[in-house]
Structures are given as structure tokens and as C-alpha cells.
Amino acid sequence: MATSLSLSQFLSSLLPSKQPIPPPPPPSSLHFPNKPPSGWVSLVSTTLDPTTPSCSSFINPIVCPALAYSNTLYFKSCYNVQVIVGENEPEDKLVGRFRREVLRAGVIQECKRRRYFENTHDKKKRKARDAARRNRKWRPLPKVQAKREAPKKKNGDKDDNWDDYEVDLPYCKH
Amino acid sequence: MAKPAPRIGSRRNGRIGLRKSARRIPKGVIHVQASFNNTIVTVTDVRGRVISWSSAGTCGFKGTRRGTPFAAQTAAGNAIRTVVDQGMQRAEVMIKGPGLGRDAALRAIRRSGVILSFIRDVTPMPHNGCRPLKKGVCKNKQNIEMISEK
């Protein structure tokens, strides 16, 4: 939410239009070569960050992180994935690249998930499954380390004093 | 409601309408909507005004065959053939939806000889908006129809 507010402030200072961007705004006030999208869509589009920014307008993410992916604002459609086609790129390579980008963005998975309603129980199960898959992928080490540490502890028992000493204890028969 | 007679020269920005065949558009946008049951390919100009369209259904496929990648391929080929004759050289591709026709349509577009600048996925994603249907609705409907027929 904070990024969207800062974005609207930045835009209002940048553009000659005096109006801020409320939902739904009149698009004619903004001056763009292509017809701009309605305001709330453009604000929201920054969250759908494209994997490759278009080469026409590039804003350094260090200078203004909120506007780093604002290239989507200049297009009528806010896209999930963009693939810039090179010259004489073979068909298979292009299709493969597009498929890989879409897989990384998780578009089809998201579509299937949102097709039917998911109650809280199913949602919990799905989240647990995803978390398990993620942990299995990126953290297979902790189990191996635990196995190495367990035998070491057994060797340490030798230092403990477990010898039997004869001590006169009251109320004990020896 | 009768349309008023068009006055020549009065509406430049408005609809051209009847003069469709005269339009020569070098650059356009190809929209591919790939749902689970069908694929629709629409060719528009940069502003979004439709030039021609085609779908798996209009290509002669019926029922479940419309959702196949081959149907998407023929639909894309059909849509682009009419436009390439009109002189379209460069195009952007906008793909929407989760269907099987996505890749097949893309391949057909690539093979048709149009120079592609961008390929974008514009599947609409709600930010937790409308509540979708409950699970198994379509299957239940089919079962009810079968029972009522008997």
C-alpha cells in the first residue's frame, strides 16, 4: 500500500495533470502516446512485476524502487510476463523461453487455483504442500547435519563420571 | 433506431466503419484468448480496433475438439491469413488464459511470417476479488442433465 501511495504522489508531481489517480479516473487528463489505463489498474500493475522490463523507458530500481517496473503503466494492458523477441530467433527456442517465463511467474497454476473456490481447509493444505516442497528443494542439509551431530554426543558420555562409589548413605543397607 | 446519414469530414477520430477494405495497417496486435474449451484469435490495430478474428469453433471444430492445440493452430492461421494479405508486417502478441492453445497459437503465428516484437501474457489476475464457483459445479450439472434425460 505504501508503494502505491508514493507512486501516485510521484506521478502527480511528474505529470502536468492536477488530478490524483482515484478509482476510476478520467484517462484523458494524462498525456501519453497510447491511451493509458484507468488509474487503479496502473497503480496495481506495479505489483505484477514483469520479469524483463521493456527497453523503451528504464528507471533504475535503486533511484526509485516504486517506479522500477512502471513500464507496464505505458501499455494499455498490464502484463504478467513479457518476452522480447530477438531477430531470427528459432521458433522452438522462442516458445520454450515463453513457457519458462510463464512457469516462473506461476500464471497457469494461479489460474487453476482460482477457477473454483478454495475453503480455508484446502487453502491450508495447499500452503503446507507448497512450503514442504520449497523446504525440500532449498534445505535438504539440516537432516544430514543432525545425523552427524547425534553420534558425537554419544562419545562425550565417556567423560562423565558414572563409576560406582561406595558411600555410606543413611537409611540404606549395604 | 435509424442511423443518421454520415457526413463526410465531420468525424475524423470516429469510426471508419464502411471503409474496412481500404485500411492498410503495418503494425498490429494479435490477441489470443485460450480457455480450456476454446481458443479465440483476434487481430486488432495498435489502438485496439478489431480487424479480423477467428476461433476454433468458427474453423469447424465442435465440442471438446475446440480446446485442442491443433484447433488453436488452425484458428491462428486463419486469422492471420486475412491480415497478412492486407499488409501487416509487425505484430505484438497478447496471450490470455490457461488453455492448451497458448503454445500452438504462438507457433502458428511465428510460422506465418509476421515479425513479432513482444509476446505478453495478459491473463487477468484478481487481487482476491469475486468469489469463484464452488468445486465440482460443472460435473454436478452434467449428472443432473443425464438423470433428467433418463
Image: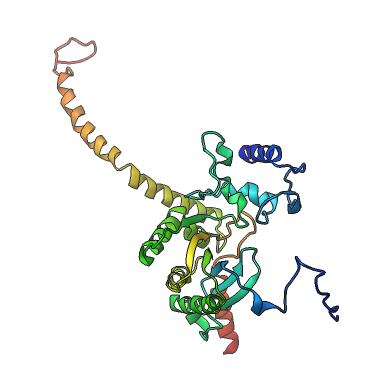
Tell me where residue B9 appears, x and y as whole percent. Answer: 80, 71
User: Along the horizontal axis of the image, is A14 left or right of A163?
Assistant: right
Instruction: Name the quarter where the C terminus of chain B is drawn.
Output: bottom right
Tell me where residue B21 appears, x and y as whole percent. Answer: 65, 79
Picture mark count: 0
| Residue depicted at x 51% and y 59% | B120
Residue B127 visible in the current orientation = no
| Residue depicted at x 55% and y 61% | B123
As drawn, A38 above or below B109: above
Q: Nearer the viewer, residue A71 or B46?
A: B46
State the residue lying farthest toward the front: B9
Residue A98 visible in the current orientation = yes
As drawn, A45 above or below B135: above
| Residue depicted at x 38% and y 66% | A91
Tell me where residue B103 appears, x and y as whole percent. Answer: 44, 68
As drawn, B80 above or below B131: below
Q: Nearer the viewer, residue A21 or B149?
A: A21
Instruction: Name the quarter where the N terminus of chain B is drawn.
Output: bottom right
Tell me where residue A39 appears, x and y as whole percent. Answer: 69, 49
Q: Quadrant of residue B104?
A: bottom left
